[in-house]
Image: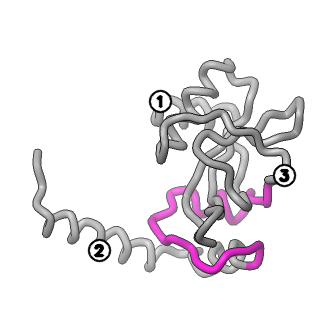
Amino acid sequence: MKITLNQLRALIKEELEAADKQPGWEELENRLLQIDGKEVSRQYEEDMAKLLSRGKVWPAKKTVVMAGDPSRCHANVANLYDSNEGRAGIVTGWALGPNDGIWRQHSWLWWPPKKQLVETTLKRDAYFGFELTKSEADQFSFENY
């Protein structure tokens, strides 16, 4: 099904309006901007409650990059999670862009043996998110692979 440019614009406008009305946005935005950055790219956050209760800053210094497809962090993470048979943890949340100071939704892997992040697109300046439980990670993998 093809959509017109006007239909696409309407969908984007709806998404932004839904994000602005979502409870918890002000708190999440404040947390992110206290870490660093100048702006948050608001969009609907399906894990808002989990981010506010379980979210934390993750160490960016020891991040390793295992390049996947650009702009496909969720699918890349699901693929690596499956190929490592669940030995790595999935973390989802927000990451600060390296060149523009903007926070965007993002997912990455946590490699416990080395206590380091595994990035599948490009290294970010800061990370805030929560580690998924085994059942949450399995579901994430199923939905995004």
**Residue indicated by mark 1:** 145
In the displayed structure, does residue 38 sit left or right of residue 13? right
In the displayed structure, does residue 56 sit left or right of residue 23? right
Residue 84 appears at what percent x and percent y?
Answer: 68, 20
- Tell me the amino acid under the disc marked 3: Lys
Q: Is residue 22 magenta?
A: no
Q: CA distance from mark 3 to mark 1?
A: 27 Å
Mark 2, residues whose alpha carbon is within 10 Å: few (<14), some, or many (≥20)? few
In the displayed structure, does residue 125 sit left or right of residue 22? right
**Residue indicated by mark 2:** 13
In which quarter of the view is residue 5 placed? bottom left
In the displayed structure, does residue 60 sit left or right of residue 40? right
Range of residues picked out in magenta: 34-58
Q: CA distance from mark 2 to mark 3?
A: 36 Å
What is the number of callouts on the image?
3
**Residue indicated by mark 3:** 61
Q: CA distance from mark 1 to mark 2?
A: 28 Å
Residue beneath the point at 55% across and 58% down: 105
Is disc 3 placed on a helix, strand or loop? loop
Residue 113 appears at what percent x and percent y?
Answer: 88, 29
Q: Of label 3 and label 1, which has the lower sequence position? A: 3
